[in-house]
Image: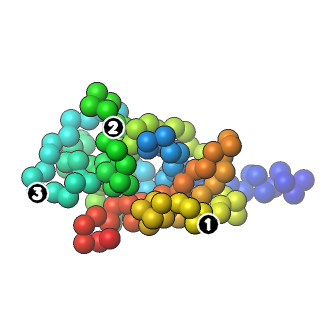
Amino acid sequence: MRTQATQSAVTDADLYLTLTVAGQSCGVPVLVVRDVLGPQVITRIPLAPPEVAGSLNLRGRIVTAVDLRRRLGLPPRAADAQPMSIVVEMAGELYSMLADAVGEVVPLRQDDSAANPPTLDAVWREVSKGVHRRDGQLLIVLDVERVLAIGGGR
């Protein structure tokens, strides 16, 4: 009985949108996700940091697009690959995080998380809140605020 009560106690704060970057499974809290978009027209921004892919127009609002591959120091995606946009809100501004694929919304309870392994790359450790084992794979929970701390914020 207790297991059943524990399972039903999942809150919105325990729900994460899964995404993939260079084959690595990641999760972001659904409470910060405002939209998930397919391939978008992205306009380059002159003199922007390399992690900033550019900007896109979302229903009349300008949204800064951050390429998660570049932000995490990973190789660029294939020229013909079309990234997905996960639009998040941080400090009243909208940002698009470009990922290779978007998965499903899953419950990830804080009780079941583990600290970052010492072998996790330093860039990933900087932007990760911890890890979960899911389907025999390591899922890295991203700290959206740290992911978006580009340039002087790092």
Mark 1 secondary-structure assignment: loop
Disc 3 or 2, which lies upstream in sequence? 3
Disc 3 or 1, which lies upstream in sequence? 3
Query: What residue did someone put label 2 on?
Result: 77
Q: Is residue 133 above or below residue 113?
A: above
Q: CA distance from mark 3 to mark 1?
A: 36 Å
Query: What residue did someone put label 3 on?
Result: 47
Drawn side of residue 130 relative to residue 88, left or right = right
Q: Inspect the image, locate mark 3, and give the three-letter code of the amino acid beneath it.
A: Leu
At 15% from the left edge and 42% from the top edge, which residue is drawn? 43
Mark 3 secondary-structure assignment: loop
64 or 57: which is nearer to us?
Answer: 64
Q: CA distance from mark 2 to mark 1?
A: 29 Å
Drawn side of residue 10 relative to residue 104, left or right = right
At 87% from the left edge and 57% from the top edge, which residue is drawn? 2
**Residue 55 shows in the view:** yes
At 32% from the left edge and 66% from the top edge, which residue is drawn? 149
Residue 22, position as x, y percentages in the image = 43, 42
Q: CA distance from mark 3 to mark 2?
A: 21 Å
Label disc, if present, on residue 115 of the rendered structure: 1
Tag 3–tag 2 contact (CB < 8 Å): no
146 or 4: which is nearer to us?
Answer: 146
